[in-house]
Image (tube, rainbow, N blue to C red):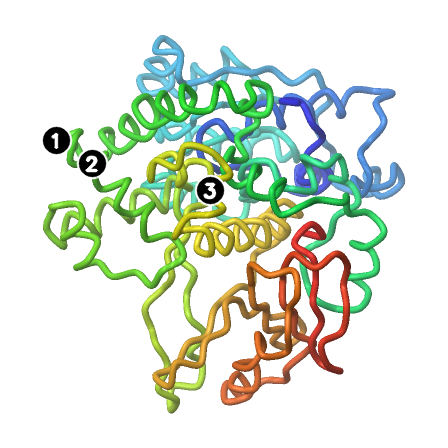
Amino acid sequence: MENLPRTLAPALLRVSSQFPVLMLTGPRQVGKTTLLEMCARLELPGSAAPSGAGKPAEAASRQAVFAPPRAYVTLDDLDARALARRDPALFLQTWPAPLIIDEVQYAPELLSAIKIAVDRERRNGMYWLTGSQKFDLMRGIGESLAGRVAVMDLLGLSQAEQDGRADRSAPFLPTPEWIASARANARSKSLQQVFEQIWLGAYPRLHLLGPSGRDVFYRSYVQTYLQRDVQDVLRVTDQTAFHRFLAAAAARTGQLCNYAGLARDADVDNKTAKAWLSVLETSGVVYRLQPDFRNRTQRIVKAPKLYFLDTGLAAYLTKWPDAAALEAGHMSGAMLETWAVAEVLKSYWHHGLEAPLHYYRDTHQQEVDLLIESADTLFPVEIKKTASPALQAARSFPAIAKLGMRVGPGAVLCFADRDLPLSREVAAIPLRYL
């Protein structure tokens, strides 16, 4: 299952034909290298392009693109890293374009050399870069490769990818058209099966190992990857404190960011909590969903909401022993909301799009889990652990009219067997449609 088709592949190939440099970011172990290697094979003459990759006539009209085969080098290799840092120009001569450079954050010196090579050759598709740590990397890319690089984000396997419908998914929007397409393609799935997905997590390797290998995988992930990445940036001296902080953050997934409370739970100071959470966000472990407060005359809560981008990691850190215990436990609703938000986020990022997501909460306790903006319209979404949704679940939707934008159809994501109207403006949509 590690080599399941990924939704991002067509957009990645299309963008590579339009820019000299492609930067693919995302957490470690989500399949960045595997995706690029798969796309490199699709570049080969005679390979069938994935759906949406573009027609030959379209490609021919674009600026010349490098012919395959595409070489690969990783900066996890200490010798390659040393050369890249010591003599970037020689590195690029040793591994000429077209080239995949894995973990480019370890040699930011390469970016200026890549700019020179790109400006000299003026061809699209020259370099594909990956990075697991955004930290200072994105600043360097913005300074050195502005106008020459396209940045794309990859997360763990989406539900659509796990279900084998990567090429039949679309960015989530609760319109009649999206609902009809999802209804035709979604698999039947019970509440228990969804919580098994939530508990296991979305890292491709886990879907090869299965539940029996889950704890070993996450133990290694936390120790080898998260702690090492943070150590590289923040020089953490107390690994126990950092692990305690991770667990405290996981326990707060789906909640408003309260830095003082997080610092207290982790037994660190506020400054440390903010710094560590920022690193977790830039390395793709957590996501801070910002409120929509465009109408500043309204009394809107302005704190972001915190979400882990992989619920399996959050469940591991909060010590849920199995999916049944998680489903019956006190974090059930928060984990379900976290999973749904991540799935909606993937539905945009894995199509190469920015995710136009916010949430709404005012001082009168009116709250909407997700606001999706499209074509100057806001689409309100609630996430509920129920198989029998009622219109009451959408009671806060009218409040978003205060934001001064047109309001589109709303949705209650839930465990209903199929989609059904709750009113003329609100539909219940099964979570399995995501």
**Image quadrant of residue 98?**
top right
Of the residues under marks 3 and 2, which one precedes in the sequence?
Answer: 2
Q: Are marks 1 and 2 in contact (CB under 8 Å)?
A: yes
Q: Quadrant of the N terminus?
A: top right
* Type of amino acid at the residue the image marks with label 1: Asp
Question: Mark 3 — residue?
Answer: 311
Q: State the separation of the CA atoms marked 3 and 2.
A: 19 Å
| Mark 3 or mark 2, whichever is nearer to me | 3
Q: Residues within 10 Å of mark 3 (few under 14, many from 20)?
A: many
**Which disc, if any, is residue 238?**
1
**Which disc, if any, is residue 242?**
2
Residue appearing at x 19%, y 58% in the figure: 261
Q: Is residue 339 left or right of residue 217?
A: right
Q: Position of residue 53 (x, y in %)?
A: 78, 39
Of the residues under marks 3 and 1, which one precedes in the sequence?
Answer: 1
In the foreground, 39 or 317: 317
Q: Are marks 3 and 2 in contact (CB under 8 Å)?
A: no
* Type of amino acid at the residue the image marks with label 2: Phe
Above or below, 226 against 141 in this view is: above
* Type of amino acid at the residue the image marks with label 3: Thr
Residue appearing at x 56%, y 68% in the figure: 382
**Image quadrant of residue 110?**
top left
Above or below, 49 against 254 in this view is: above
